[in-house]
Amino acid sequence: MAGGTFNKRAGKVRPGTYINFESTRQDTVNGGSRGIVALPLTKATYGPAKQWITLTAASPDGAFAQLGYSIYDEDENRQMLLIREAFKKASQVLVYIVNEGQKATVTKTSTEGESVAATITATAKYGGTRGNALCFAVAENPVGGFDVVVTLGTNTVAEYGGLETVEDLAAQNCGYIAFTGNGNLFAVAGATLTGGTDGEASNSDIAAFLDSLEAVRFNTLCFPITEASLQAAAKTKIMYIRENVGKGVQAVMPDTKSADYEGVINVTNSVAIGGDKLSHAEACAWVAAATAAAENTESNTYVAYDGATEVVDPKSHEDAVAAINNGEFFFSVSEAGDVVVEYDINSLVTFKKPKDKTYRKNRVIRVFDTFAESIQLNFPPNKFNNNSTGWDVMEGIGRTILKQFEDAGAITNVDAENDFLVDRDLSQGDETYFNVGLQAVDSTEKLYFTIATR
């Protein structure tokens, strides 16, 4: 369904639900489930390229065969660490491997006299150096036929019993190795696959990943990439998804200079877990998950980073003040000694109509985004008549949504009679215009006490 913002004079061509948010402040002026993180793996050593792999908190290792690792493994390029950190808060992590390398392979033959009697060729299901850790063995079964065992590193990942031919083995459709060849099976003490190489992610691979974001449902993009041009491309894509596709998403990226937008969170320091110091890019995984999982009545200010033992690249008081004014998201140490989020803000620092300073607060943005999602769910095209009867029905539904958000503590100062109205002068033909008043509730994050001593 089409969505995004609209211009009253130009209107829209596609049927859809279009929403404008405008600040009305004069001083300077049913929602869906959350917790879904999109994560590109730019240095994966195994797995299918340019495909989305859905992992859930209930079964985080459900894609072991595709990733080649448990998410609890310590892989050389620390790709599993990103997934682990995301799962400290996320309900789902959508993994995308941006580039696939060369597949590992090995061929074994048996002979009868001077001729080849049978051939087994084993090829890793996916490209990458992790395929070089695959091995298979074939042993004669005392009852009949042959048994085949497939291992990945120290893990046995597949076993087949009583097979007679290489064609029988190929028909098992192993999730780790593609077997080909012909002839009767024969004993193989252990054949390790070799020749697997890793792919190198190009700018076009990252661009393909960003384009694929439009096809999946997510709350936050973890973009652990430091190259400025790619960060700018990610910001552009998030802006497009927010403002043209109509999805309330945000991106989290490290040390970006191309921000100043409520849809981008700029992470500028990191944490250590035990003795392991995470890079700023790696810390983005937890920030993306914490952002995705937070409800529209929650702020992440002073929320503790799970398992963190110290701040990496801590900021002095003066640095912290400058960072906040610069729209940076960073970690500090609380009075209780916990490693916490200093301030749950995004990178917006230019405040002018229609966006005032409240738009830099991520809790406020979550209210706007979840409200927009509720509107889209309840007001699809071609559901209501565009006449006074239909307008009355739509206004009733809209007021119900406002009440739900007010009761949840997400919005305040609701005027039930005037905060959700159809513009009956502009609405005609197949176009219906609404005027909605919305004041998001923020968290109490700056407390000022004046104490009179006696």
Image (cartoon, rainbow, N blue to C red):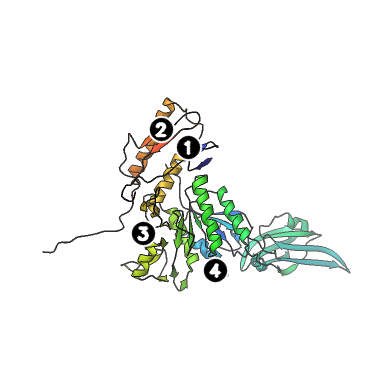
Residue 197 can be seen, yes or no: yes
Q: Residues within 10 Å of mark 2 (few under 14, many from 20)?
A: few
Left/right of residue 1 with respect to residue 403 in the rendered view: right
Residue 396, percent from left and from top: 38, 32
Q: Position of residue 147 (x, y in %)?
A: 71, 62
**Which mark lies nearer to you, 2 or 4?**
2
- Which residue carries the number 3 mark? 301
The mark that comes first in sequence, 1 or 3, is: 1
Viewer-nearest residue: 31 or 261: 261
Query: Which sits in the foreground, 84 or 44?
Result: 44
- Count residues near mark 1 (Cα–Cα under 10 Å), then give few for <14, some for 14-19, many for 20+: few
Mark 3 closeness class: few <14, some 14–19, many ≥20 residues within 10 Å: many
Identify the mark nearer the N-term, 2 or 4.
4
Label pair 2/3, CB-CB below 8 angstroms: no
Q: Amino acid at mark 4?
A: Glu
Report the Cα–Cα distance between label 2 and label 3.
Answer: 38 Å
Give the residue furthest to the right.
114
Identify the mark nearer the N-term, 1 or 2: 1
Name the amino acid type tagged 3: Thr
Q: Can the viewer see residue 144 in this picture?
A: no
Closer to the camera, 8 or 269? 8
Which circle marks residue 9 in the picture?
1
Task: Kindly report the distance in space between the C-alpha atoms of the residues bearing marks 4 and 1.
Answer: 56 Å
Q: Which residue is mark 4?
A: 74
- Find the distance from the CA under tag 1 to the CA under tag 2: 14 Å
Viewer-side label of 3, 4: 3
Front tag of 4 and 1: 1
Hey, which residue is sitting farthest bottom in the picture? Answer: 275
Q: Which mark is residue 423?
A: 2
Amino acid type of the residue that numbered disc 1 sits on in the rendered structure: Arg
